[in-house]
Amino acid sequence: MFGLGLPEMVVILVIALLFFGPSKLPSLGKSIGEGIRSFKKGLAEEPSEEKAKVEK
């Protein structure tokens, strides 16, 4: 995944912990997960406006 190994992931996690603090980290992870999930769902579904344009 983008050439990131375990040491790089640990460094990123430590920097995030220092920057956001231990109390905000779980809520930040949850919001990022929800954002990724909705992005994937949006990619999988074709918007209804585009369907109407294609059908015409």
Image: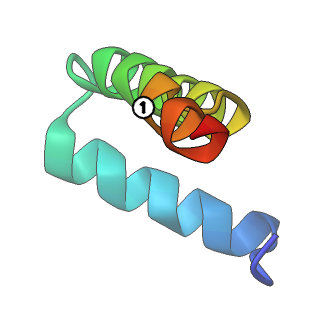
Q: Which residue is mark 1?
A: 49
Residue 4 is situated, as x and y percent measured from the top left of the image, at 75, 76
Rendered image quadrant of residue 28 = top left
Left or right of 30 on screen, residue 18? left
> Could you tell me which secondary element the residue under label 1 belongs to?
helix
For the residue pair 5 and 43, the one nearer the viewer reads as: 43
Determine crowd level at label 1: few under 14, some 14-19, many 20+ residues with C-alpha closer than 10 A: few
Q: Quadrant of residue 55?
A: top right
Q: Residue at x 22, y 16 (%)?
A: 23
Amino acid type for the residue under numbered disc 1: Glu
Q: Residue at x 50, y 43 (%)?
A: 53
**Where is the C terminus found, in terms of image quarters?**
top right
Residue drawn at x 80%, y 84% as measured from the top left: 3
- In the drawing, does residue 2 fall left or right of residue 14? right
Q: Is residue 6 above or below residue 16?
A: below
Colouring: rainbow
